[in-house]
Amino acid sequence: MKLRVGVLISGRGSNLQALIEACAKPDYPAEIALVISNEPEAMGLVRAQGADLTTETIEHHLFEDRRTFEDALTISLEKAGVDLVCLAGFMRLLTASFVSHWENRLINIHPSLLPAFKGLDVHERVIASGVRFSGCTVHFVRADMDAGPIIVQSAVPVHPADEPKDLAARVLTSEHECLPLAIRMIAEGRVRVENDVVRVVGTTSPVNGLINPSGFS
Ligand code: GAR
């Protein structure tokens, strides 16, 4: 039985596309059961329909409050038999009640090396800060924004001439690897949450560090 994933999106859906491509491989241990967008014009909906996935639009502004909007999300996700909910560019904050309902079954991808640079306009702030590395993080969601046990991270260099769009593109390439990897590891039962920290079973870590700037002898 493959892990059934519900993907929540708000826009472009390039991470959804990466997951669609991973799921197309016969040995990938997860499948996309449902894609929900809170924005009817989301490009990700077109991608999902192109892959013959079930889609739904649940527009947040049609609901009285966050709670009723989230109840509608949960009803649809449960009806579709979803095991894991994946926020892939879903730009709504979720209440503690939704987060606790899906505890350790709800993941998010964020375009920075968390816990640094939570929130919006990440790449502008990363460049302005002068850090030499940025990256992306896939993590289990907790009630605080962009917080929770980290499953996978990828580090990418920040280049001196980077504009935010250049760094965003470099980070996005890593996101497209990290999200399918995190879901694979969860589906294979390798991911344990112990004291709010993720332990990954049966994997290795890189041996050496990276230095930026490089090229000096
Ligand atoms: C991605 O860069 C994702 O990390 C970010 O939105 C983008 C969605 O792109 N998410 C957040 O900033 C959440 N805090 P996509 O729609 O092409 O996957």
Image: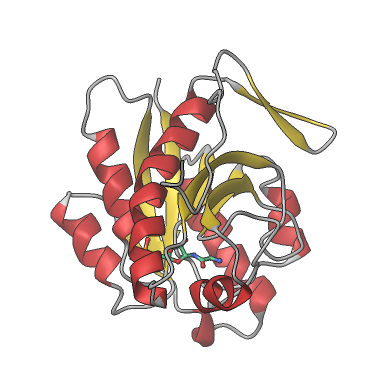
Horizontal side, residue 190 vs residue 148: left or right:
left
Task: State the count of labels.
Answer: 0
Name the quadrant of the N terminus: top left
Residue 198: x, y in percent? 70, 32
Residue 22: x, y in percent? 28, 36
Whether residue 25 is visible to the viewer of this picture, yes or no, is yes
Residue 8: x, y in percent? 45, 59
Towards the viewer: 68 or 33: 33
Q: What sort of colour scheme is used for the picture? A: secondary structure
Whether residue 80 is visible to the viewer of this picture, yes or no, is no
Horizontal side, residue 115 vs residue 7: left or right:
right
Residue 19: x, y in percent? 32, 44
**Measuring 17% from the left and 49% from the top, which residue is drawn there?**
51
The answer to whether residue 110 is above or below residue 81 is below
**Measuring 51% from the left and 51% from the top, which residue is drawn there?**
212
In the displayed orientation, state which residue is furthest to the right: 195
Q: Quadrant of residue 199?
A: top right
The picture quadrant for ligand 1 comes to bottom left
In the displayed orientation, state which residue is furthest to the top: 202
**Measuring 66% from the left and 61% from the top, which residue is drawn there?**
146
Horizontal side, residue 6 vs residue 122: left or right:
left
**Measuring 30% from the left and 59% from the top, which residue is drawn there?**
14
Towards the viewer: 39 or 202: 202
In the displayed orientation, state which residue is furthest to the front: 217
